[in-house]
Image (cartoon, rainbow, N blue to C red):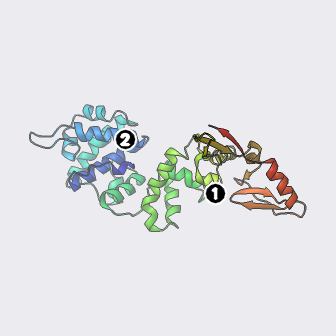
Amino acid sequence: MGCERLAETSASPRDRRFQTLVALMLSSQTKDTTNAVAMKRLQTELPPHAPGAPAGLNLENVLAADPELINKLIWAVGFHNNKTKYLKQAAVILTDKWNGDIPDTIEGLVALPGVGPKMAHLCLSAAWDRTEGIGVDVHVHRITNLWGWHTTKNPEETRLALQSWLPRDRWREINWLLVGFGQTVCLPVGRRCGECDLGLRGLCRAAEKKKVLEGRRIRESTVIEKIEDDGATVKVKEELEQDEVIEKAVVVNETVNEPTKESETEVTDGFETKSESAPEQRDALSKKARRSKRV
């Protein structure tokens, strides 16, 4: 779930927009799951600003709340002390300059404390349903450079590069697609290339070859059901011989050389295999016959 989707659907349109802004302000250097917990506490534990007024997360309650209480409710997010100050300052600005609502322009949003271009574009899209740019965070910047889409030095350069060619109707979804991918599979440290379809199919130039080979070996193992002589059904794991899998070289970060007369090479589904005559193929098949074992 993207942080821009944490606003309460039951809140008024104005309060939903404010909650969207707050969720984005809390999101930097913070996991979505942690942000969701902090948002839920603000939505349920902020006291009403006046007797008879509704409790929960709205502009008036943030204005009236003691900073120590807000800090206590959001303590789990990164840089919670600074974010507490930003929330209080932003609440004053929204009251004085925006009639109690959030800005409906990129310029107005980035003028708020703690709000940068990425947050502004995401907020404008989620809160006002207007997509005027791509929200680029560290995941989008890192992954698109890993894939070789461009060579950029910072998220703002990446945003401009993506907007120069990516169809406008994809601007909104690319952020949450790549952020989720970067948080679960293509991690900053310890990328899970063996679990990634792009790596397993030889489509990712940055995939780690050892992880891809191991992931391919695991995926080529199958579990089947076998009926024993006594009528019992057992599960049998059927897998390729270890040397058969290792001999398949996934084309990752490598250039495939042109075939020569001495050794012709065929590339199929991201793998290289040597061409063989019919007798050699029969020998290879008999040598690499599948074996079954109980699991």
Q: Which residue is mark 2?
A: 35
- Where is residue 200 drawn, in percent x and y? 64, 52
Counting the numbered discs, the total is 2
Q: Compared to 293, does 163 lie above or below?
A: below
At 31% from the left and 38% from the top, the residue drawn is 84
Q: What's under tag 1, amino acid-wise? A: Leu
Q: Nearer the viewer, residue 63 or 197?
A: 197
What's the residue at 34%, 51% (across, down)?
5
Occupied quadrant, residue 149: bottom right
| Residue sitting at the far front | 230
Marks 2/1 in contact by CB < 8 Å: the verdict is no
* Quadrant hosting residue 273: bottom right
The answer to whether 238 appears left or right of 163 in the picture is right
Seen from the viewer's position, the closer of residues 239 and 259 is 239
Drawn side of residue 189 relative to residue 172, left or right: right
At label 1, counting other C-alpha atoms closer than 10 Å, the crowd grade (few under 14, some 14-19, many 20 or more) is some
Residue 113 appears in view: no
Q: Is residue 234 visible?
A: yes
Residue 231 placement (x, y as % from top left): 58, 42
Which residue occupies 64% across, 57% down? 203
| Earlier sequence position, callout 2 versus callout 1 | 2
Query: In the picture shown, does residue 127 fall above or below 59?
Result: below
Residue 271 in the image: state x and y as whole percent: 72, 56
Foreground: disc 2 or disc 1: 1
Q: Residue furthest right?
A: 262
Relative image position of residue 16 (x, y in whole percent): 26, 52
Judging from the image, what secondary structure is the residue with disc 1 in? loop
The amino acid beneath tag 2 is Asn
The residue where tag 1 is placed is 203
Label 2 element class: helix
Q: CA distance from mark 2 to mark 1?
A: 33 Å
Q: Residues within 10 Å of mark 2 (few under 14, many from 20)?
A: many
